[in-house]
Amino acid sequence: MNDWISSFVFFFAVIDPVGTLPVFIAVTARHAEWQKRKIAIIAVLVATGILLFFLLAGQYLLETIGVPLSAFQVAGGVVLFLFALTMIFGEGKPEQEVEIARSGHETAIFPLAVPSIASPGAMLAAVVLTDNYRFDPIHQMRTATSMLAVLGIVLLLLLTAQWIHRWIGNAGASIVSRVMGLILASVATTNVLVGIQQFFSI
């Protein structure tokens, strides 16, 4: 149960469902309500497909090109840490991706499905948390269900985006993103330390 909760928190931090709200609102500002629902469903389905691909085949892809998972984990941890710092101190995910949305790319695929929902951090998490050398199939199934649970929360938030945004506002979304950034920074540091330990123990 603790493993499921930890992977759920990890995915919640890297996907940042609350931080996706302002992005979704900006992207769908000129659409009718039924179109907003359709865009939300398509975006989550596409993101789910991408993350499931990385969950199932990400490690095999890395092994095919000769990259050990420990090296990928260290590199990914560094990237995640830098990303977390931007969430804490600089522009958070909402501000960055709202600007992308305002530039005219108003589709469910970009920037909603990628990189807002299926972020690089989420792809990394899908690979690292299903390492075939560290986790058995049951643990990997738990990881998959925790990821799908977070994606279900994303869909629920997007379908009720207008009401939630009126309730928490941009400031509330920014606060949540910064808290998630702090959690993500600690997770990223752990990934780097574990990756280094595994690399030198091979």
Image (cartoon, rainbow, N blue to C red):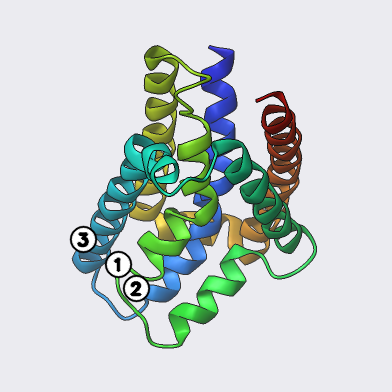
What x and y, as percent, mark residue 154? Answer: 41, 47
User: Residue 58 appears in which quarter of the rendering?
Assistant: top left
User: How far separated are the C-alphas under marks 2 and 1?
Assistant: 9 Å
- Tell me the mark number nearer the camera, choosing from 3 and 1: 1
Helix, strand or loop status at disc 2: loop
Q: Nearer the viewer, mark 2 or mark 1?
A: 1
Could you tell me which residue is drawn at 76 percent across and 68 percent down?
Answer: 90
Q: Earlier in the sequence, mark 3 or mark 1?
A: 3
On the image, numbered disc 3 is attached to which residue? 38
Judging by the rendered image, the residue that carries numbered circle 1 is 108
Query: Residue 29, percent across and down?
Result: 37, 77
129 or 154: which is nearer to us?
129
Disc 3 element = helix
Direction from residue 157 to residue 108 in the image, left or right: left
Q: Quadrant of the C terminus?
A: top right
The percent coordinates of residue 163 (x first, y second) are 44, 56
Q: Is residue 137 above or below residue 56?
A: above
Image coords of residue 114 (percent x, y): 40, 62
Callout 3 amino acid: Lys
Name the residue type under label 2.
Thr
Instruction: Report which residue position mark 2 lands on.
Output: 28
Query: Is 184 in front, or is 193?
Result: 193
Residue 123 lies left or right of residue 2; in this view the side is left
The disc labelled 1 sits on which kind of residue? Answer: Ala
Q: CA distance from mark 2 to mark 3?
A: 10 Å
Vertical order, 115 against 56 (above or below): below
Q: Secondary structure at mark 1?
A: loop
Q: Residue furthest right?
A: 89
Q: Are marks 3 and 1 in contact (CB under 8 Å)?
A: yes
Give yes or no for contact between labels 2 and 1 (Cβ–Cβ under 8 Å): no
* Residue 99, quarter of picture: bottom right
Bin the neighbour count of mark 1 within 10 Å (Cα to Cα): few under 14, some 14-19, many 20 and up: many
